Amino acid sequence: MAALALQGPTSAQLLKSIVDNADIAGLKYFRVTHATIAGMQVDISRTGYTGDLGYEIWMPWHEGPKIWDALMAKGRAFDLHPAGMLALDVTRIEAGLLLIDIDYNSSKKAIVERQKYSPFELGLGRLVHLDKERFVGRDALINEQTYGHPREIAGLEIDWNAIERIHDEIGLAPIMPAAASRVAVPVYKNGTQVGKATSTTWSPTLKKLIALATVKRDFAKPGTHLEMEITVDAVRHRVPARVVKTPFLNPKRKTATPPV
C-alpha cells in the first residue's frame, strides 16, 4: 500500500480534473471514495496532516510512481509542488495536530508519572465515554473528570515585535528557520514556569510565530498572557506569548461540502 497526500486550496480542483468515476465535490470531510486515476484504481479520503483542504490517495505500492507522475503532469496548471516531512511539520502545527513523543508521551514510553498524558489533557475529552461498561483506566478518568485535569495542551502566538527588539539590540536581523523546532522550551507566568512549548514554527501562511505548549490548566484559557523562552546568539530571553485556540489555521474550505 502506498499513499500520496494532495493538500492545499486547489487540491479539489486538481482532483476533479484528473479523477474518473468519483464525486470529489460531494466527498465529505473524513469520508472515502473509490476512483480511477490514469486508468488505475485508487481510494481517495478527504483527510490530511495539514490545516487546509486536502485529500489522501491510497493505492497499491507498485502503482505509486504512476499516480505521482499523473498528478505532477496535470498539477502544473494548479501550481502543484512536491513537499516533504519538514514542510509537513509546519503545516501540522498550523493545524494544531499533535505529534506523539514530541507534544505528548504515550503511557508505554513514559518513564515517570508526570510524563503520562490523559485524553482530557490532550483535548480529546469528547472521545471519552465514561458511561460504558468497565474498561482499563475508567476509574482514573472519572476521578479526573470530577476533580479536573492539571494541565492542557494549548496554542501560543509569540510576540514577534519583542523578538525583533532583542535582535536589534545586539545588531542581528531576526531570522527564523524554515523548519519547525521540536525542542521543548520553558513557558512562564510572572517569572514562574507553568509549562513548556514543544513544537514551534514560523507560519508562512499566518505570518506569525506559533507554538503548541503544555501548560497548567489555570493558564490555558485563550487570551492568557505568558512568556516563552527563546535563545538568541547563545543567550536566553523571555518574550511575551498569548494563549489562542487551536487550530491556528482553519479555513472553511477544509470541511465544507462542496469545498470552496
Image: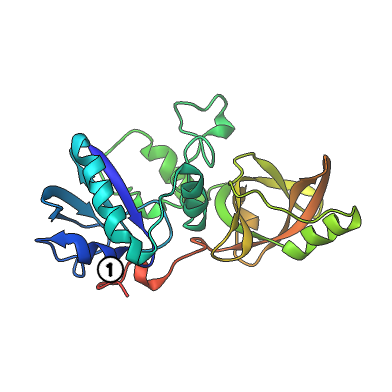
Q: Which residue is at a point 25% across and 41% down the rendered structure image?
A: 65
Residue 101 vertical placement versus 243 (above, below)? above
| Residue 14, percent from left and from top | 27, 64
What's the coloring here?
rainbow
Under mark 1, the amino acid is Gln
| Residue 119, percent from left and from top | 43, 45
| Residue 175, percent from left and from top | 72, 53
Q: Secondary structure at mark 1?
A: helix
Q: Which residue is at a point 40% across and 38% down the rendered structure image?
A: 139
* Image quadrant in which the N terminus is located: top left
Q: How many marks?
A: 1
| Residue 72, percent from left and from top | 31, 53
Q: Nearer the viewer, residue 251 or 241?
A: 251
Residue 198 vertical placement versus 209 (above, below)? above
Q: Is residue 213 visible?
A: no
Using the rendered view, name the quadrant where residue 55 is placed.
bottom left
Where does label 1 land, which residue? 13
Q: Nearer the viewer, residue 7 or 197?
A: 7
Q: Nearer the viewer, residue 136 or 187?
A: 187
Q: Which residue is at a point 90% across and 52% down the rendered structure image?
A: 170
